[in-house]
Image (spheres, rainbow, N blue to C red):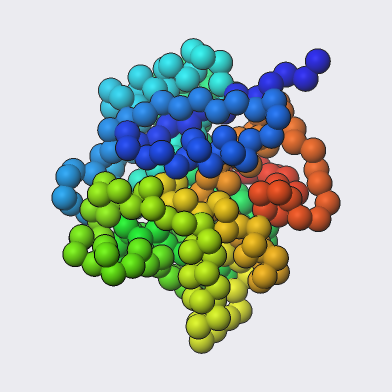
Amino acid sequence: MTTAARLGILVIHNDPVPETEIWGMAPAGVSIHTARFECPRPADTEYVGSPARAFASSAELARGLDHLGQLGTDSIALCFGSSSFFGGPSFDTEFIAEAESHSHGTPVYTAAVAMTAALKAAGVRRPLVMMPPWFTPPTFEATERYLAEVGIERIRIAQFDLGPEWAGIPRYNAFDEGARWVVDPDDVRQQTLAAFKDAEDTAFDGILVPGSGFRAQGAVVPLEQELGIPVITANQSVLWYGLNQGTFKPRTETGQSLHGSLFNLRLPAGGSR
């Protein structure tokens, strides 16, 4: 009898996207279990990072890790990539070490670790990075530093535009003001295509869409078909990494996967840690 896979995810309190996208991609026999924690970004401010060990041992995160570990999940993912981008790869190492002291032995990983492994598996070294509309220049710079540290040669940043009706709202407040609900994956596809075609240097070997709360998964397969390069998103990477970490082994397919070519690939030897 095949044992069902159970993936635990840690999600900020007002983000509906990771569980809906990951549930939508999960193959038969895989269940998704969510624990929530208060977003560490103070109201009406830009987020600039969190100390890894203090973050992992904060009351709500420690409780979520405890509950998901007791539930019997096979692995637990932190769906909050910005904390890794600002803290660098050392954040991932320190966060995971502290988090696993609360998770009853359940392996923990971060969305950034999953994205790094996905980029490596897909052979992507020069991605176009389509940023969520609520990211700001400090996050752009942090993301670029993080990707350089994990071996990405160079990136070009584009950003999704919500449209003129959002012009009066500070970018860093757009998520809390409801932008998480209004992103249309087809708009993500169209704006990514435009950014790809408008770039002076189009030697991109992949597309990266970071941001767990950025509803972009529906754009993945159309973009891969139109551009002929891998497209990797945060939530797609979290599911793929969790499936490859656990005892559940998804069937290796040939050709185009229903949710992107990443699911045709295996985790690189040694993962990304």
- Residues 186 and 147: in front is 186
Q: Is residue 219 above or below residue 240?
A: below
* Residue 271 picture location, percent across and down: 63, 43
Q: Position of residue 111 (x, y in %)?
A: 49, 44
- For the N terminus, the quadrant is top right
Percent of width and height locating residue 143 = 40, 59
Q: Can you see residue 77?
A: yes
Q: Residue at x 35, y 19 (%)?
A: 63
Q: Residue at x 55, y 38 (%)?
A: 22
- Drawn side of residue 232 relative to residue 254, left or right: left
Q: Residue at x 47, y 51 (%)?
A: 215
In-front residue for pair 262/66: 262
Q: Position of residue 202 (x, y in %)?
A: 58, 81
Say whether residue 116 is visible: no
Outermost residue on the left side: it is 44
Quadrant of the snapshot with the C terminus? top right
Work out whether residue 59 or residue 169 is closer to the camera in this orientation and state it.
169
- Residue at horizontal 35 percent and vertical 23 percent from the top: 62
